[in-house]
Amino acid sequence: MEGTKKRTAVLLLSSAILVAAGLVAIGSGFSAALATTTMTTPSVPPVNLKTDNGSVDVVVDWSPKEIQQGQAAEFSINFKDPSSGALLEHVNYSLEVKDAGGNTIESLTDQHVHAGEAVQMITFDNTGDFQLTITVLGTGLEMPFDTSHSGTAATSVMVASS
């Protein structure tokens, strides 16, 4: 009987930790679905992301909040210094959108923003879950870029039927 109580307590504690970790991940804008190819939990804008190496905070917002199939959506992207919160200047980045099957539906390379705030218009031809990936190549006006602010950040986006 004592062993059963201990196992039950451990299982309950483990479940509570997993639920708490999931809530923290969702609250930070990271969807556990991004770790796999099947995306099921879309993010709610604005989404606060960090690059994989923690060197850039990326805030992504979109309008309309509920993206409709076949209608353009405006994505605003802010690149910030994680230690000061200040917008980064002369950010060079790429943006890619993939569907749940891993097919690229939008690829914008060699993008540059002077004052840390970018706007991109994207039209989704299909409904479902999509992954938006932003790769910060570095800062500067000419190559080689300063890569002290670089890395990749991603979030999921849901597109509804119109």
Image (cartoon, helix red, strand yellow):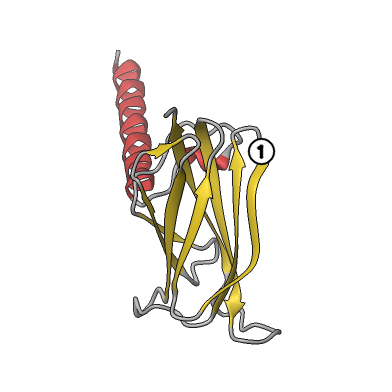
Kindly indicate the quadrant of the structure image that contains residue 140: bottom right
**Residue at 49%, 81% in the rendered image:** 114
Q: Residue furthest right?
A: 144
Place of residue 11 in the rendered image (x, y in percent of width and height, measured from the top left): 36, 26
Kindly indicate the quadrant of the structure image that contains residue 92: bottom right
Give the side of residue 132 with respect to residue 10, left or right. right
**Which sits in the foreground, 102 or 56?**
102
The 10 Å Cα crowd at callout 1, few under 14, some 14 to 19, many 20 or more, is: few
Q: Is residue 32 above or below residue 117?
A: above
**Which sits in the foreground, 52 or 111?**
111
Q: Is residue 93 above or below residue 21?
A: below
Place of residue 106 in the rendered image (x, y in percent of width and height, measured from the top left): 62, 49
**Residue at 65%, 54% in the rendered image:** 107
Place of residue 143 in the rendered image (x, y in percent of width and height, measured from the top left): 70, 84
Q: Which residue is mark 1?
A: 102
| Element at label 1 | loop
Please name the amino acid that badge 1 sits on: Gly
Q: Is residue 36 above or below residue 1?
A: below
